[in-house]
Protein backbone atom coordinates (compact mmCIF):
# COMPACT_ATOMS: atom_id res chain seq x y z
CA UNK A 1 0.00 0.00 0.00
CA UNK A 2 1.32 3.38 -0.89
CA UNK A 3 -0.71 6.11 0.64
CA UNK A 4 -0.09 9.78 1.09
CA UNK A 5 -1.77 11.90 3.71
CA UNK A 6 -4.52 13.85 2.04
CA UNK A 7 -5.37 11.02 -0.36
CA UNK A 8 -6.30 8.94 2.65
CA UNK A 9 -6.69 9.84 6.29
CA UNK A 10 -4.72 6.84 7.50
CA UNK A 11 -1.09 5.80 7.22
CA UNK A 12 0.94 3.23 9.11
CA UNK A 13 3.70 5.68 9.93
CA UNK A 14 3.41 9.45 10.01
CA UNK A 15 6.74 11.23 9.90
CA UNK A 16 6.80 14.84 11.09
CA UNK A 17 9.38 16.98 9.28
CA UNK A 18 11.19 16.73 5.95
CA UNK A 19 14.65 17.69 7.18
CA UNK A 20 17.66 15.40 7.20
CA UNK A 21 16.04 13.24 9.91
CA UNK A 22 12.62 12.86 8.29
CA UNK A 23 14.11 12.09 4.86
CA UNK A 24 16.38 9.51 6.51
CA UNK A 25 13.43 7.94 8.33
CA UNK A 26 11.50 7.65 5.07
CA UNK A 27 14.45 5.94 3.39
CA UNK A 28 14.86 3.27 6.07
CA UNK A 29 11.14 2.69 6.33
CA UNK A 30 10.59 2.10 2.64
CA UNK A 31 13.79 0.05 2.36
CA UNK A 32 12.90 -2.32 5.21
CA UNK A 33 9.10 -2.20 5.04
CA UNK A 34 8.15 -1.48 1.45
CA UNK A 35 4.57 -2.61 2.10
CA UNK A 36 3.91 -0.07 4.82
CA UNK A 37 2.20 3.20 4.09
CA UNK A 38 3.76 6.40 5.30
CA UNK A 39 3.61 10.12 4.83
CA UNK A 40 5.82 13.03 5.78
CA UNK A 41 4.08 16.15 7.01
CA UNK A 42 6.22 19.24 6.58
CA UNK A 43 5.18 22.62 7.98
CA UNK A 44 7.20 24.60 5.46
CA UNK A 45 6.87 24.80 1.69
CA UNK A 46 10.16 22.98 1.04
CA UNK A 47 12.25 20.06 2.23
CA UNK A 48 15.66 20.29 3.85
CA UNK A 49 14.75 21.80 7.24
CA UNK A 50 17.74 23.65 8.70
CA UNK A 51 19.54 23.63 5.35
CA UNK A 52 16.68 25.36 3.57
CA UNK A 53 15.83 27.78 6.37
CA UNK A 54 19.20 29.34 7.12
CA UNK A 55 20.39 31.71 4.40
CA UNK A 56 23.03 33.85 6.08
CA UNK A 57 26.35 34.47 4.32
CA UNK A 58 28.70 31.50 4.51
CA UNK A 59 26.11 29.05 5.95
CA UNK A 60 27.86 25.69 6.20
CA UNK A 61 28.13 22.56 8.29
CA UNK A 62 30.59 22.38 11.12
CA UNK A 63 30.84 18.63 11.15
CA UNK A 64 32.27 16.70 8.23
CA UNK A 65 29.85 15.55 5.56
CA UNK A 66 31.32 12.06 5.61
CA UNK A 67 29.58 11.57 8.94
CA UNK A 68 26.84 14.18 8.52
CA UNK A 69 25.79 12.48 5.26
CA UNK A 70 23.68 9.32 5.36
CA UNK A 71 25.33 5.95 5.70
CA UNK A 72 23.40 4.80 2.61
CA UNK A 73 24.34 7.69 0.32
CA UNK A 74 28.00 8.56 -0.17
CA UNK A 75 29.01 12.20 0.04
CA UNK A 76 30.84 12.39 -3.29
CA UNK A 77 33.28 15.14 -2.53
CA UNK A 78 36.40 15.53 -0.48
CA UNK A 79 35.06 18.92 0.69
CA UNK A 80 34.24 17.81 4.21
CA UNK A 81 32.92 21.09 5.64
CA UNK A 82 30.30 21.87 3.02
CA UNK A 83 28.16 24.92 2.36
CA UNK A 84 24.41 24.98 2.92
CA UNK A 85 23.61 24.88 -0.79
CA UNK A 86 25.60 21.67 -1.32
CA UNK A 87 23.98 20.01 1.70
CA UNK A 88 20.52 21.01 0.49
CA UNK A 89 21.29 19.65 -2.98
CA UNK A 90 22.42 16.35 -1.40
CA UNK A 91 19.17 16.10 0.59
CA UNK A 92 16.97 16.95 -2.40
CA UNK A 93 18.87 14.42 -4.51
CA UNK A 94 18.13 11.77 -1.86
CA UNK A 95 14.45 12.69 -1.87
CA UNK A 96 14.25 12.44 -5.68
CA UNK A 97 16.38 9.29 -6.04
CA UNK A 98 14.39 7.40 -3.44
CA UNK A 99 10.96 8.57 -4.63
CA UNK A 100 10.33 10.11 -1.22
CA UNK A 101 8.94 13.33 -2.72
CA UNK A 102 5.53 11.83 -3.48
CA UNK A 103 5.08 11.03 0.22
CA UNK A 104 5.71 14.58 1.43
CA UNK A 105 2.85 16.95 2.11
CA UNK A 106 4.05 20.56 2.43
CA UNK A 107 2.49 23.41 4.40
CA UNK A 108 1.27 20.72 6.79
CA UNK A 109 2.07 21.62 10.37
CA UNK A 110 1.28 19.05 13.02
CA UNK A 111 -0.20 20.90 15.96
CA UNK A 112 -1.55 18.06 18.10
CA UNK A 113 -1.40 14.28 18.29
CA UNK A 114 -3.75 12.22 20.44
CA UNK A 115 -3.14 8.57 21.13
CA UNK A 116 -6.14 6.37 21.81
CA UNK A 117 -5.60 3.03 23.54
CA UNK A 118 -8.97 1.78 22.32
CA UNK A 119 -8.21 2.57 18.69
CA UNK A 120 -4.48 1.81 19.07
CA UNK A 121 -3.69 4.78 16.84
CA UNK A 122 -2.71 8.40 16.76
CA UNK A 123 -5.15 11.04 15.59
CA UNK A 124 -3.04 13.90 14.38
CA UNK A 125 -4.31 17.44 13.90
CA UNK A 126 -2.67 19.17 10.98
CA UNK A 127 -2.81 22.84 10.08
CA UNK A 128 -2.47 23.97 6.50
CA UNK A 129 0.03 26.80 6.94
CA UNK A 130 -1.18 28.55 3.78
CA UNK A 131 -4.89 28.63 4.57
CA UNK A 132 -5.00 28.06 8.32
CA UNK A 133 -7.53 25.24 7.84
CA UNK A 134 -7.21 22.06 9.89
CA UNK A 135 -7.69 18.40 9.15
CA UNK A 136 -6.81 15.11 10.81
CA UNK A 137 -4.67 12.16 9.79
CA UNK A 138 -4.62 8.86 11.68
CA UNK A 139 -1.53 6.75 12.05
CA UNK A 140 -0.37 3.68 13.88
CA UNK A 141 3.04 5.23 14.50
CA UNK A 142 4.18 8.80 14.94
CA UNK A 143 7.82 9.45 14.07
CA UNK A 144 8.84 12.93 15.18
CA UNK A 145 11.70 14.23 13.01
CA UNK A 146 10.88 17.86 13.70
CA UNK A 147 14.36 18.99 14.77
CA UNK A 148 14.87 20.80 18.04
CA UNK A 149 14.21 24.49 17.58
CA UNK A 150 11.48 26.94 16.69
CA UNK A 151 11.41 27.91 13.05
CA UNK A 152 9.38 31.10 13.45
CA UNK A 153 11.75 32.88 15.81
CA UNK A 154 15.41 32.68 16.73
CA UNK A 155 16.57 33.51 20.25
CA UNK A 156 17.39 37.17 20.98
CA UNK A 157 17.99 38.33 24.53
CA UNK A 158 16.72 41.72 25.60
CA UNK A 159 19.16 44.43 24.58
CA UNK A 160 18.75 47.77 26.30
CA UNK A 161 18.35 50.66 23.86
CA UNK A 162 17.65 48.40 20.88
CA UNK A 163 15.25 50.94 19.42
CA UNK A 164 17.94 53.62 19.47
CA UNK A 165 20.14 51.92 16.90
CA UNK A 166 19.53 53.51 13.49
CA UNK A 167 20.88 50.71 11.26
CA UNK A 168 19.48 47.25 10.51
CA UNK A 169 19.43 44.63 13.30
CA UNK A 170 19.42 41.17 11.76
CA UNK A 171 18.99 37.68 13.23
CA UNK A 172 20.80 34.98 11.20
CA UNK A 173 17.69 32.78 11.25
CA UNK A 174 15.81 35.44 9.29
CA UNK A 175 18.47 36.84 7.01
CA UNK A 176 17.00 39.52 4.72
CA UNK A 177 17.64 38.60 1.08
CA UNK A 178 19.82 41.24 -0.53
CA UNK A 179 21.08 42.84 2.69
CA UNK A 180 23.87 45.10 1.43
CA UNK A 181 26.76 45.13 3.84
CA UNK A 182 29.54 46.07 1.39
CA UNK A 183 31.97 48.41 3.08
CA UNK A 184 29.84 48.56 6.24
CA UNK A 185 30.93 48.19 9.87
CA UNK A 186 29.20 45.05 11.08
CA UNK A 187 28.98 43.91 14.69
CA UNK A 188 28.12 40.24 15.15
CA UNK A 189 26.92 39.56 18.70
CA UNK A 190 27.69 35.98 19.68
CA UNK A 191 30.50 33.47 19.88
CA UNK A 192 28.86 30.27 18.66
CA UNK A 193 28.96 28.31 15.41
CA UNK A 194 26.85 30.89 13.57
CA UNK A 195 29.02 33.84 14.60
CA UNK A 196 32.28 32.13 13.64
CA UNK A 197 30.77 31.19 10.27
CA UNK A 198 29.33 34.59 9.48
CA UNK A 199 32.35 36.69 10.41
CA UNK A 200 34.90 35.39 7.85
CA UNK A 201 32.15 35.13 5.21
CA UNK A 202 31.11 38.78 5.65
CA UNK A 203 34.65 40.03 6.12
CA UNK A 204 36.15 38.13 3.23
CA UNK A 205 39.79 37.39 3.68
CA UNK A 206 41.40 39.50 1.01
CA UNK A 207 39.24 42.61 0.86
CA UNK A 208 37.26 41.50 -2.20
CA UNK A 209 34.33 43.63 -3.41
CA UNK A 210 30.98 43.10 -1.73
CA UNK A 211 32.41 42.29 1.67
CA UNK A 212 32.01 44.29 4.86
CA UNK A 213 34.38 47.11 5.69
CA UNK A 214 35.06 45.55 9.07
CA UNK A 215 33.39 42.87 11.17
CA UNK A 216 33.58 42.83 14.95
CA UNK A 217 32.73 39.71 16.89
CA UNK A 218 31.22 40.98 20.13
CA UNK A 219 31.01 38.24 22.72
CA UNK A 220 30.16 38.05 26.39
CA UNK A 221 31.97 34.72 26.85
CA UNK A 222 34.56 33.14 24.55
CA UNK A 223 34.09 29.73 22.90
CA UNK A 224 36.65 27.13 21.90
CA UNK A 225 37.44 27.61 18.24
CA UNK A 226 39.23 24.77 16.52
CA UNK A 227 40.65 25.04 12.99
CA UNK A 228 39.84 21.98 10.86
CA UNK A 229 40.74 21.18 7.24
CA UNK A 230 37.87 21.95 4.88
CA UNK A 231 38.95 19.13 2.57
CA UNK A 232 39.45 15.53 3.59
CA UNK A 233 42.58 14.50 1.72
CA UNK A 234 42.43 10.96 3.04
CA UNK A 235 38.92 10.61 1.65
CA UNK A 236 40.16 11.80 -1.74
CA UNK A 237 42.84 9.08 -1.71
CA UNK A 238 40.47 6.41 -0.43
CA UNK A 239 37.81 7.08 -3.04
CA UNK A 240 40.44 7.07 -5.80
CA UNK A 241 41.65 3.72 -4.49
CA UNK A 242 38.39 2.05 -3.47
CA UNK A 243 35.68 3.92 -5.38
CA UNK A 244 33.01 6.23 -3.90
CA UNK A 245 30.98 3.65 -1.99
CA UNK A 246 33.82 1.93 -0.17
CA UNK A 247 35.97 5.04 0.13
CA UNK A 248 33.04 6.83 1.78
CA UNK A 249 32.36 3.92 4.14
CA UNK A 250 36.00 3.81 5.29
CA UNK A 251 36.26 7.60 5.69
CA UNK A 252 33.02 7.60 7.63
CA UNK A 253 34.24 4.92 10.02
CA UNK A 254 37.57 6.70 10.53
CA UNK A 255 35.90 10.06 11.13
CA UNK A 256 33.42 8.61 13.63
CA UNK A 257 36.35 7.18 15.57
CA UNK A 258 38.24 10.46 15.31
CA UNK A 259 35.25 12.51 16.54
CA UNK A 260 34.71 10.27 19.55
CA UNK A 261 38.45 10.18 20.33
CA UNK A 262 38.60 14.00 20.25
CA UNK A 263 35.54 14.32 22.49
CA UNK A 264 36.88 11.72 24.96
CA UNK A 265 40.30 13.36 25.04
CA UNK A 266 38.68 16.73 25.80
CA UNK A 267 36.48 15.28 28.55
CA UNK A 268 39.24 13.22 30.20
CA UNK A 269 42.11 15.65 29.90
CA UNK A 270 40.51 19.10 29.70
CA UNK A 271 43.73 20.92 30.67
CA UNK A 272 45.76 19.23 27.95
CA UNK A 273 42.96 19.75 25.40
CA UNK A 274 42.70 23.42 26.34
CA UNK A 275 46.45 23.78 25.80
CA UNK A 276 46.36 22.08 22.39
CA UNK A 277 43.53 24.34 21.21
CA UNK A 278 45.23 27.45 22.61
CA UNK A 279 48.51 26.56 20.87
CA UNK A 280 46.67 26.15 17.55
CA UNK A 281 44.95 29.51 18.05
CA UNK A 282 48.22 31.24 18.92
CA UNK A 283 49.84 29.89 15.76
CA UNK A 284 47.08 31.36 13.57
CA UNK A 285 46.67 34.75 15.26
CA UNK A 286 48.89 37.85 15.16
CA UNK A 287 51.80 37.82 17.66
CA UNK A 288 50.31 40.44 20.00
CA UNK A 289 46.74 39.07 19.94
CA UNK A 290 45.22 38.62 23.44
CA UNK A 291 44.33 34.94 22.94
CA UNK A 292 43.38 34.31 26.57
CA UNK A 293 40.98 37.22 26.66
CA UNK A 294 39.09 36.19 23.51
CA UNK A 295 39.53 32.43 23.04
CA UNK A 296 39.77 30.96 26.53
CA UNK A 297 36.31 29.94 27.79
CA UNK A 298 35.52 29.50 31.50
CA UNK A 299 34.41 25.86 30.91
CA UNK A 300 36.15 22.74 29.64
CA UNK A 301 36.51 21.81 25.95
CA UNK A 302 33.35 20.10 24.64
CA UNK A 303 31.31 20.98 27.76
CA UNK A 304 29.57 23.11 25.15
CA UNK A 305 29.56 22.66 21.40
CA UNK A 306 33.00 23.40 20.03
CA UNK A 307 33.22 25.79 17.09
CA UNK A 308 35.02 24.42 14.06
CA UNK A 309 36.48 26.82 11.53
CA UNK A 310 37.49 25.40 8.15
CA UNK A 311 41.15 26.11 7.38
CA UNK A 312 41.15 28.63 10.24
CA UNK A 313 39.16 31.15 8.17
CA UNK A 314 38.10 33.15 11.23
CA UNK A 315 41.73 33.53 12.30
CA UNK A 316 42.72 34.59 8.79
CA UNK A 317 40.04 37.31 8.81
CA UNK A 318 41.37 38.55 12.16
CA UNK A 319 45.01 38.39 11.07
CA UNK A 320 44.17 40.22 7.84
CA UNK A 321 42.66 43.09 9.87
CA UNK A 322 39.18 42.57 8.36
CA UNK A 323 37.73 41.23 11.62
CA UNK A 324 38.34 41.75 15.32
CA UNK A 325 37.06 40.42 18.61
CA UNK A 326 35.68 42.32 21.60
CA UNK A 327 34.83 40.48 24.80
CA UNK A 328 32.58 42.37 27.18
CA UNK A 329 29.12 42.96 28.58
CA UNK A 330 26.65 45.03 26.55
CA UNK A 331 25.25 47.98 28.48
CA UNK A 332 23.07 49.39 25.72
CA UNK A 333 22.70 49.80 21.99
CA UNK A 334 23.27 53.40 20.90
CA UNK A 335 22.37 55.26 17.70
CA UNK A 336 25.58 54.15 16.02
CA UNK A 337 26.75 51.02 17.79
CA UNK A 338 27.04 49.36 21.16
CA UNK A 339 28.17 50.70 24.52
CA UNK A 340 29.77 48.15 26.87
CA UNK A 341 29.45 48.21 30.64
CA UNK A 342 33.15 49.05 31.00
CA UNK A 343 32.63 52.21 28.92
CA UNK A 344 34.08 50.95 25.63
CA UNK A 345 32.07 51.59 22.46
CA UNK A 346 31.84 49.39 19.38
CA UNK A 347 30.73 51.34 16.30
CA UNK A 348 28.33 49.64 13.88
CA UNK A 349 26.30 50.27 10.75
CA UNK A 350 24.67 46.82 10.98
CA UNK A 351 24.17 44.61 14.05
CA UNK A 352 23.77 40.85 13.67
CA UNK A 353 22.37 39.06 16.72
CA UNK A 354 23.91 35.59 16.38
CA UNK A 355 22.48 34.79 19.79
CA UNK A 356 21.06 31.37 19.11
CA UNK A 357 17.95 29.30 18.81
CA UNK A 358 14.76 28.75 20.77
CA UNK A 359 14.60 25.05 21.51
CA UNK A 360 11.19 23.50 20.81
CA UNK A 361 11.12 19.78 21.52
CA UNK A 362 8.91 17.54 19.37
CA UNK A 363 7.99 20.24 16.88
CA UNK A 364 5.86 22.02 19.48
CA UNK A 365 3.21 19.28 19.05
CA UNK A 366 0.68 18.99 21.89
CA UNK A 367 0.72 15.26 22.68
CA UNK A 368 -1.94 13.41 24.65
CA UNK A 369 -2.29 9.75 25.59
CA UNK A 370 -5.92 8.76 26.12
CA UNK A 371 -6.80 12.38 26.76
CA UNK A 372 -3.99 13.02 29.29
CA UNK A 373 -1.49 15.68 28.17
CA UNK A 374 2.10 14.49 27.84
CA UNK A 375 4.48 16.93 29.50
CA UNK A 376 7.91 16.05 28.12
CA UNK A 377 9.63 17.17 31.34
CA UNK A 378 7.74 14.45 33.27
CA UNK A 379 8.84 11.64 30.94
CA UNK A 380 11.94 9.52 30.73
CA UNK A 381 13.69 8.81 27.48
CA UNK A 382 13.76 5.17 26.38
CA UNK A 383 16.85 4.22 24.32
CA UNK A 384 17.19 7.89 23.41
CA UNK A 385 14.25 7.60 20.99
CA UNK A 386 10.92 6.99 22.81
CA UNK A 387 9.13 8.45 25.83
CA UNK A 388 7.98 6.56 28.91
CA UNK A 389 4.26 5.84 28.80
CA UNK A 390 3.83 7.08 25.23
CA UNK A 391 2.99 4.25 22.82
CA UNK A 392 4.13 4.03 19.21
CA UNK A 393 5.98 7.33 19.33
CA UNK A 394 9.57 7.85 18.20
CA UNK A 395 11.73 10.91 17.94
CA UNK A 396 15.20 11.81 16.75
CA UNK A 397 17.51 14.01 18.76
CA UNK A 398 20.96 13.68 17.24
CA UNK A 399 24.34 14.04 18.86
CA UNK A 400 25.56 17.41 20.05
CA UNK A 401 29.20 16.25 20.11
CA UNK A 402 29.20 14.49 16.73
CA UNK A 403 27.17 14.55 13.53
CA UNK A 404 23.44 14.56 14.16
CA UNK A 405 22.77 12.15 11.30
CA UNK A 406 24.73 9.32 12.90
CA UNK A 407 21.94 8.96 15.42
CA UNK A 408 19.24 9.20 12.74
CA UNK A 409 20.54 6.03 11.06
CA UNK A 410 20.70 4.05 14.29
CA UNK A 411 17.25 5.13 15.51
CA UNK A 412 15.71 4.25 12.14
CA UNK A 413 17.42 0.86 11.99
CA UNK A 414 16.14 0.09 15.48
CA UNK A 415 12.65 1.23 14.50
CA UNK A 416 12.44 -0.97 11.42
CA UNK A 417 13.76 -3.92 13.46
CA UNK A 418 11.13 -3.23 16.08
CA UNK A 419 8.41 -3.20 13.43
CA UNK A 420 9.64 -6.55 12.07
CA UNK A 421 9.66 -8.03 15.56
CA UNK A 422 6.13 -6.78 16.23
CA UNK A 423 4.82 -7.99 12.86
CA UNK A 424 6.20 -11.47 13.48
CA UNK A 425 4.42 -11.71 16.85
CA UNK A 426 1.22 -9.90 15.99
CA UNK A 427 1.94 -6.94 18.24
CA UNK A 428 0.33 -3.61 17.42
CA UNK A 429 1.50 -1.38 20.23
CA UNK A 430 4.84 -0.80 21.94
CA UNK A 431 4.92 1.31 25.10
CA UNK A 432 8.06 2.00 27.16
CA UNK A 433 7.29 1.50 30.85
CA UNK A 434 9.81 2.09 33.66
CA UNK A 435 9.99 -1.02 35.87
CA UNK A 436 11.05 0.86 39.00
CA UNK A 437 9.06 4.07 39.15
CA UNK A 438 11.43 5.51 41.77
CA UNK A 439 14.51 5.35 39.52
CA UNK A 440 16.53 8.56 39.98
CA UNK A 441 16.48 10.81 36.95
CA UNK A 442 18.61 13.62 35.64
CA UNK A 443 18.43 16.12 32.80
CA UNK A 444 18.32 14.92 29.21
CA UNK A 445 21.89 16.12 28.66
CA UNK A 446 24.80 17.60 30.60
CA UNK A 447 25.66 19.67 27.56
CA UNK A 448 26.11 23.25 28.74
CA UNK A 449 25.28 25.27 25.60
CA UNK A 450 22.93 28.16 26.38
CA UNK A 451 20.13 27.05 24.05
CA UNK A 452 20.02 23.60 25.68
CA UNK A 453 20.28 24.90 29.26
CA UNK A 454 17.40 27.33 28.62
CA UNK A 455 15.20 24.43 27.50
CA UNK A 456 16.10 21.67 29.96
CA UNK A 457 12.74 21.93 31.76
CA UNK A 458 10.89 21.25 28.50
CA UNK A 459 13.02 18.26 27.54
CA UNK A 460 12.38 14.74 28.80
CA UNK A 461 14.74 13.39 31.46
CA UNK A 462 17.01 10.36 31.46
CA UNK A 463 17.23 7.60 34.05
CA UNK A 464 20.23 6.20 35.88
CA UNK A 465 20.56 2.95 33.93
CA UNK A 466 20.03 1.44 30.49
CA UNK A 467 17.80 1.63 28.51
CA UNK A 468 16.80 4.93 30.11
CA UNK A 469 20.17 6.63 29.81
CA UNK A 470 20.91 8.85 26.83
CA UNK A 471 24.13 7.73 25.22
CA UNK A 472 26.57 10.39 24.11
CA UNK A 473 28.58 8.31 21.69
CA UNK A 474 27.82 6.55 18.46
CA UNK A 475 29.70 3.45 19.62
CA UNK A 476 27.44 3.02 22.68
CA UNK A 477 24.37 3.52 20.54
CA UNK A 478 25.60 0.91 18.07
CA UNK A 479 25.48 -1.59 20.95
CA UNK A 480 22.13 -0.35 22.25
CA UNK A 481 20.26 0.30 19.03
CA UNK A 482 21.88 -2.04 16.51
CA UNK A 483 23.08 -5.06 18.48
CA UNK A 484 20.72 -5.36 21.46
CA UNK A 485 17.47 -7.29 20.89
CA UNK A 486 14.45 -5.02 20.51
CA UNK A 487 12.22 -7.05 22.86
CA UNK A 488 13.12 -5.43 26.11
CA UNK A 489 11.17 -6.17 29.33
CA UNK A 490 10.55 -2.45 29.72
CA UNK A 491 8.98 -2.17 26.28
CA UNK A 492 5.44 -3.48 26.77
CA UNK A 493 3.74 -4.91 23.72
CA UNK A 494 0.04 -5.29 23.08
CA UNK A 495 -1.62 -7.36 20.40
CA UNK A 496 -2.64 -5.71 17.14
CA UNK A 497 -6.33 -5.00 16.76
C1 LIG B 1 22.94 26.77 11.25
C2 LIG B 1 23.03 25.37 11.74
C3 LIG B 1 24.11 24.57 11.38
C4 LIG B 1 24.20 23.26 11.85
N1 LIG B 1 25.27 22.49 11.50
C5 LIG B 1 25.35 21.22 11.95
C6 LIG B 1 26.45 20.39 11.60
O1 LIG B 1 27.37 20.77 10.91
N2 LIG B 1 26.48 19.13 12.07
C7 LIG B 1 25.48 18.65 12.87
O2 LIG B 1 25.56 17.50 13.26
N3 LIG B 1 24.43 19.41 13.19
C8 LIG B 1 24.33 20.68 12.77
N4 LIG B 1 23.27 21.45 13.12
C9 LIG B 1 22.18 20.88 13.87
C10 LIG B 1 21.13 20.55 12.78
O3 LIG B 1 19.96 21.22 12.99
C11 LIG B 1 20.96 19.08 12.61
O4 LIG B 1 22.15 18.47 12.37
C12 LIG B 1 20.02 18.66 11.48
O5 LIG B 1 19.99 19.50 10.37
C13 LIG B 1 18.69 18.51 12.08
O6 LIG B 1 17.92 17.85 11.15
P1 LIG B 1 16.42 17.48 11.47
O7 LIG B 1 15.84 16.95 10.24
O8 LIG B 1 16.38 16.62 12.68
O9 LIG B 1 15.77 18.86 11.90
P2 LIG B 1 15.54 20.16 11.02
O10 LIG B 1 16.59 20.37 10.03
O11 LIG B 1 15.27 21.25 11.99
O12 LIG B 1 14.21 19.81 10.22
C14 LIG B 1 13.00 19.65 10.90
C15 LIG B 1 11.86 19.82 9.92
O13 LIG B 1 10.66 19.57 10.62
C16 LIG B 1 9.70 20.55 10.29
N5 LIG B 1 8.78 20.67 11.42
C17 LIG B 1 9.07 21.08 12.68
N6 LIG B 1 7.96 21.04 13.44
C18 LIG B 1 6.97 20.60 12.65
C19 LIG B 1 5.59 20.34 12.88
N7 LIG B 1 5.03 20.52 14.08
N8 LIG B 1 4.85 19.89 11.83
C20 LIG B 1 5.40 19.68 10.61
N9 LIG B 1 6.71 19.92 10.35
C21 LIG B 1 7.48 20.37 11.36
C22 LIG B 1 10.52 21.81 10.05
O14 LIG B 1 9.81 22.72 9.25
C23 LIG B 1 11.76 21.23 9.36
O15 LIG B 1 11.62 21.19 7.98
C24 LIG B 1 23.17 22.74 12.67
C25 LIG B 1 22.09 23.57 13.04
C26 LIG B 1 22.02 24.86 12.59
C27 LIG B 1 20.85 25.71 13.00
Image (cartoon, rainbow, N blue to C red):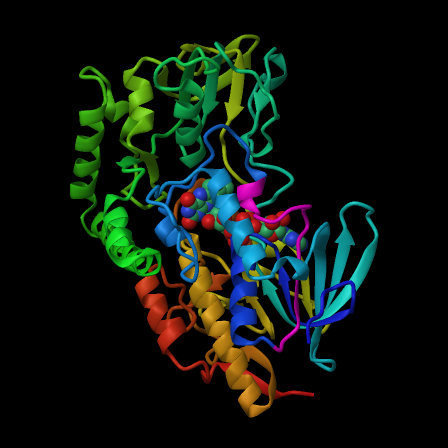
**Residue at the spot 40% in from the left edge and 22% down from the top edge:** 217
Frontmost residue, 388 versus 421: 421
Residue most toward the bottom?
Answer: 425
Residue 423 seen anywhere in this rendered image of the structure: yes
Residue 42: image location, x then y, percent:
66, 53
Count of marks overlaid on the render: 0
Specify the principal SS of the magenta part. Answer: loop
**Residue at the spot 78% in from the left edge and 69% down from the top edge:** 8
Q: Is residue 49 above or below residue 97?
A: above
Quarter where residue 3 is shown = bottom right
Residue 71: image location, x then y, percent:
40, 61
Residue 148 seen anywhere in this rendered image of the structure: no
Q: Is residue 1 magenta?
A: no
Frontmost residue, 192 versus 443: 192
Residue 227: image location, x then y, percent:
27, 35
**Residue at the spot 44% in from the left edge and 27% down from the top edge:** 198
Q: Is residue 236 above or below residue 27?
A: above
The answer to whether residue 17 is left or right of residue 400 is right
Q: Which residues are magenta?
A: 35-52
Residue 313: image location, x then y, percent:
32, 27
Q: Classify the position of the N terminus by image quarter.
A: bottom right
The answer to whether residue 469 is left or right of residue 14 is left
Quarter where residue 287 is shown = top left
Q: Classify the position of the C terminus by image quarter.
A: bottom right
The answer to whether residue 423 is left or right of residue 248 is right
**Residue at the spot 48% in from the left edge and 62% down from the top edge:** 461
Q: Is residue 50 magenta?
A: yes
Amino acid sequence: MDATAGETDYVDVLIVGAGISGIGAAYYLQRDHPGRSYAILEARGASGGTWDLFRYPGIRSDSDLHTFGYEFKPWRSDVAIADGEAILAYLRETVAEQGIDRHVRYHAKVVAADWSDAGARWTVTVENTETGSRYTVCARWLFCAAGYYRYDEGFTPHFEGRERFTGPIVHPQHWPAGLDYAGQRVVVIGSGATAVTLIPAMAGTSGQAGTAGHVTMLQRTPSYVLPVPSRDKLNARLTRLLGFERGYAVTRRLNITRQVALWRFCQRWPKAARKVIRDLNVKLLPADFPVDEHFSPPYGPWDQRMCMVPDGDLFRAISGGKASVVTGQIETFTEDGVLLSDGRTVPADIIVTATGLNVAPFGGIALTVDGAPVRAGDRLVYKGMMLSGVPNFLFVFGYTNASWTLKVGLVCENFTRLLRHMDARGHGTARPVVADAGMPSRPFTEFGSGYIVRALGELPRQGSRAPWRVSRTYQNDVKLLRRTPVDDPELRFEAAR
